[in-house]
Amino acid sequence: MAVGSFAIGTGEFAIMGLLPDVAHDIGVTIPQAGHVISTYALGVVVGAPVLAVATAGWRQRSLLVALMLFFALGNFASAMAPGYSWLAVLRLLAGLPHGTYFGVSALVAASLAPPGRRAQAVAQVMLGLTAATVVGVPLAAWLGQALGWRAAFAMVGCIALLAAVLAWRWIPDRPPLAGASAMRELGALARPQVWVTLGIGAIGFGGLFAVFSYVKPTLMEVAGVSEAAIPWALALLGMGMVVGNIVGAKLVDRALMPAIGGILVWSAAVLALFCLTAPHAPLAFANLFLVGTTIALGPALQVRLMDVAGDAQSLAAALNHSAFNFANALGAWLGGVAISAGLGWTSTGWVGALLALGGLPLFALALRSPTRATA
């Protein structure tokens, strides 16, 4: 399952280190190329609930294999996109299986975990995603610079095919959950705390992507670093994600709600700091490591949704990644708006900090009715 999340993470984030290359090749501006990131994210937003409901009665192993095959096909097609419009459509299609794959994987991992270690089990699946930012994304950036950005998407397709084979070989072939149905899954949408938790992710997570989406041009234009140094910057950001994923999961297993609030505040602080450190390459690189740690919000919200979703676990788990990718789309879009408005490349840090702070009112709302979390 972690190999599959590695493929998805590489496919989702690789383009962020190749935006200037993509923009030049397909004849658009860098902010316009950033909208391709948003279309992928919107594919996740749409695909997660639709596929989670439509496949409610599937065996989990078969579903995970099918989702990986779909993802592989979407990335191979993206590598052959003839222009901007086609690339936008194909990235949207490639994003459709993303959320359901992560949601089902998280449920399988949590079901295998000993008591008190659900977040750490989910984090092990997410470790593939964070490892992708350390290994997969820099590798894709290097491959894209050497052979063109299309080669990066072809590489992602190959990794997804490998994940499908491994899933078929190693994931236990369990029957669907008793009573699983589309109507039962849709019951998650009637639970207010599910919506509140999704809102925290949809807004609070956006700050990470406001900075991440434009990290390459920001470092090159503001800090004056060479293109050859960008993979190292991405690797540092990825290392921060690995650390945030591991440490955050341990904090979540100890105290879930305090961990969520603390991560939001931490996110706002390190994203605002990027505005000050961006002109100075060593400080900017160190700050990117800190920005990466904000990924800790992912496992935290995944566990929160397991607590408030009742018997509609699959849809709620998948919707976490809809929220995550709505945040991706929102952050990339608002970051592009700020840059296009002439506020400068570093303005993405302020945008990110405001988005992280925007998650706090919803967090406060979640705290107001903890005893009704499952109602």
Image (tube, rainbow, N blue to C red):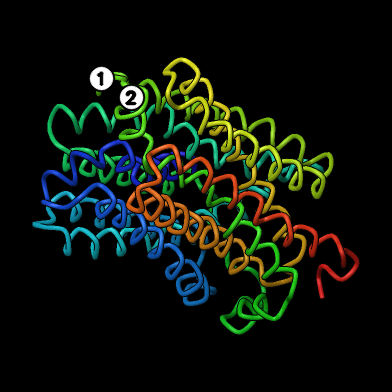
Whole-Å distance between the Cαs marked 1 and 2?
7 Å
Q: Are marks 1 and 2 in contact (CB under 8 Å)?
A: yes
Observer-nearest of 347 and 231: 347
The disc at residue 277 is: none
SS of the residue under disc 2: helix
SS of the residue under disc 1: helix
Q: Please state which amino acid type lies under the numbered disc 2.
A: Pro
Q: Crowding near pointer 2: few (<14 within 10 Å), some, many (20+)?
A: many
Kindly give the residue lying farthest to the left in the view shown.
82
Residue at (46% x, 21% y) in the render: 285
* Left or right: 277, with 109 as reference point: left
Residue at (45% x, 42% y) in the render: 347
Quadrant of the image containing the C terminus: bottom right
> In which image quadrant can residue 14 be found?
top left
Residue at (48% x, 29% y) in the render: 237
Q: Position of residue 295 (x, y in %)?
A: 58, 40
Q: Please state which amino acid type lies under the numbered disc 1.
A: Ala
Q: What residue would you read off at disc 2?
A: 231
* Left or right: 35, with 47 as reference point: left
Q: Position of residue 255 (x, y in %)?
A: 84, 43
Q: Position of residue 358 (x, y in %)?
A: 65, 56
Observer-nearest of 217 and 305: 217
Kindly give the residue lying farthest to the top in the view shown.
282
Observer-nearest of 169 and 148: 148
Q: Position of residue 70 (x, y in %)?
A: 31, 59
Q: What residue would you read off at disc 1?
A: 228
Residue at (46% x, 43% y) in the render: 348
Q: Across the whole image, how many numbered discs are drawn on residues?
A: 2
